[in-house]
Amino acid sequence: MNTLLVVIFSFGYLLLLFGVAYWAEKKSNQKSTTLKPYVYALSMAVYCTAWTFYGSIGRAADFGPDFLAIYIGPTIAAPLWFLILRKMIRICKAQRITSIADFISARYGKNTSLGTLATIVCVLGVIPYISLQIKAIAITFAFLVNHPQHTNSNSSISLLSNIPFWITVLLAVFIIIFGTRKVDSTERHEGMVTAVAFESIVKLVAFLVGGIFVIFFLFNGFDDIFSRAAAIPALQKSFTFDASYNYTDWLVMCILSMFAVLLLPRQFQVSVVENVDEKHLYKAIWLFPLYLLIINLFVLPIALAGQLLPTSSSFEADFSILSLPFVHHHQGVTLLVYLGGFSAATGMIIVETIALSTMLSNNLLIPLILKVAPFKKIFIHKVERSIKNIRRLSIILILLLAYAYFAEIAESYSLVSTGLISFAAVAQFAPAVIGGMFWSRANKNGALMGIISGFTIWFFTLIIPAIIGAGLLPKEILSDGLFGVYLLKPNQLFGLAAFTPLTHAFFWSMFINILLYILGSLYTKSSNQEEIQAELFINVSKYKAAYETSLNRTGQIKIKEIKSLMEQFLGQEKTKQLLTHFSRRYQLNLLQEDTNADQRLITYAEKILSGVIGSASSRILIESIVKEEEISLNEVVEILKESQQFISLNKELQQKSEQLKKLLMP
């Protein structure tokens, strides 16, 4: 194809996303409430990346129905969202949590170390996943314009003609514009979410059009494809699992995908942080699984078609949906399919980068700045600009790391294998997240021990072999073990050789993770702060309206100091609105600014600042100006009960007042 045509098509689509996002931002207050649940459910389909669009076909070509495990897991998990996802949404709204790392940090006493650790795990675990999206864009673009596939590493290709690099740069610009417009990370990114919902429709339509073309234009329907494939012994394996199939791998992939649809940073972003109304779950609980079903209808027929038609054999099986219309000279279908894959890749990169940049700034960079006096002074002096610049720097850093991984390592591995590595990484959060919502004894020591051990094993068993495969480490580590120790072979850790690499890594990482999480929590004591947060997380429905009384601080600070601090982060207008709402809710007088602030106001300020700089950072900031003593959990529970009764009584009085006004009206 003409290079200029494909370039214009690619960059034109990105400009269209800009337009959709800009329109949605402008119309956010006028958007129909009936559409919002559909936008929410469709945004969750960011789960379907280039891996779904291309990788599933390659997986089906090699292993038949095996590819379905990645979609059966989330489908099985969907009914559980009423129990787990709804609770996560309530917790995040009550405590203004902005990311999965912030969630873990907040649950375990707003611990900075846990937030930092979770951020590092996410960045290292998800960077390979972002890089495979860049790989999909690079390979498909190169195929269409007949360039060498490895454009970034080919010395004859100049920087100006390195399209994947410039697409990455343009995506960085898009994310910076629409992902850092507001310093408060809990405020909805209406434009970004609408753009992601739009790209979910585009990739679905493109995949269906490509599938219809292959099945009904290159063949005479499903019967023709399946009957011709059944006549070839080598393709009969595509219909069923043969006797040698490893069902343990199937189970592991189902479990990994169940965790991934909740814990991947982009999934947490769209399903929890961007949730406007928890009632939208009622729509998502059936629409999202339906989306997964529809987008996978044509995967197996396309995989079989790619092997039946010899003209497509010059290209990887992953990309059969693109190569089949291309080699049969149907330019329109080819461009639409390319656009669908491009859309799937760019949508994932946008949301994942926004989520990771929030984590990187709130849980790693800002806490470091607040602990160094000179940096803290500069930061506080120009808060809004500092926060935005830190997030912009984080976005650029993440995309540069992803591009570097693509250039050095990712091109050596398939889309599916790279994606599963990232799934296994975020699965290390499952014990700390799910256990933290239901088990009161869980504490930060158990969470730290579990995540560190699980992540270390994940890195050793999955990333080290990838680095060795790229030629960056000696092969002897695989054959002889680390330092020549037989029990430290990455693919046969502690002598276990019965499993495939993924199942092997999952077994050891999760076993050690869960074991240390339980033992660490049982045999170490929780701090008062952890006990309070555990109570608020586990019984969120009971206490969500009385969160401000959860920390009855003994330290003192003037009202004017609290107001000034909030204004530095949120501006005068926003601060005025928030404090007016707070004073009405608790019937407090905040006009006498020289008096000491009510303890509930201090906690409220910390909660509001959590939405801007994260739970750990807001705690550091408040503690630096309020010297206080800890209060026991029993005292907190009593205060919460009293506050709950007060709020209920206040609401009842307001209702009675409204009824009285109506009766007195002429």
Image (cartoon, helix red, strand yellow):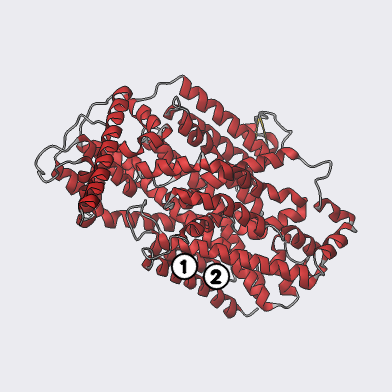
Split into 4 quadrants, where in the image is the C terminus? Answer: bottom left
Q: Secondary structure at mark 2?
A: helix
> Is residue 131 toward the left or the right of residue 588 in the image?
right
In terms of sequence position, does the residue under pointer 1 or pointer 2 come before the other? 2
Could you tell me if residue 146 is visible in this image?
no
Name the amino acid type tagged 2.
Ile
Image coordinates of residue 542 in percent, x first then y, are 38, 34
Q: Secondary structure at mark 1?
A: helix
Image coordinates of residue 276 in percent, x first then y, are 41, 53
* Position of 445 relative to 307 (above/below): above
Residue at the spot of label 2:
163
Split into 4 quadrants, where in the image is the N terminus? Answer: bottom right
* Position of 240 relative to 432 (above/below): below
- Mark drawn on residue 170: 1
Image coordinates of residue 234 in percent, x first then y, are 86, 54
Could you tell me if residue 249 is visible in this image?
yes
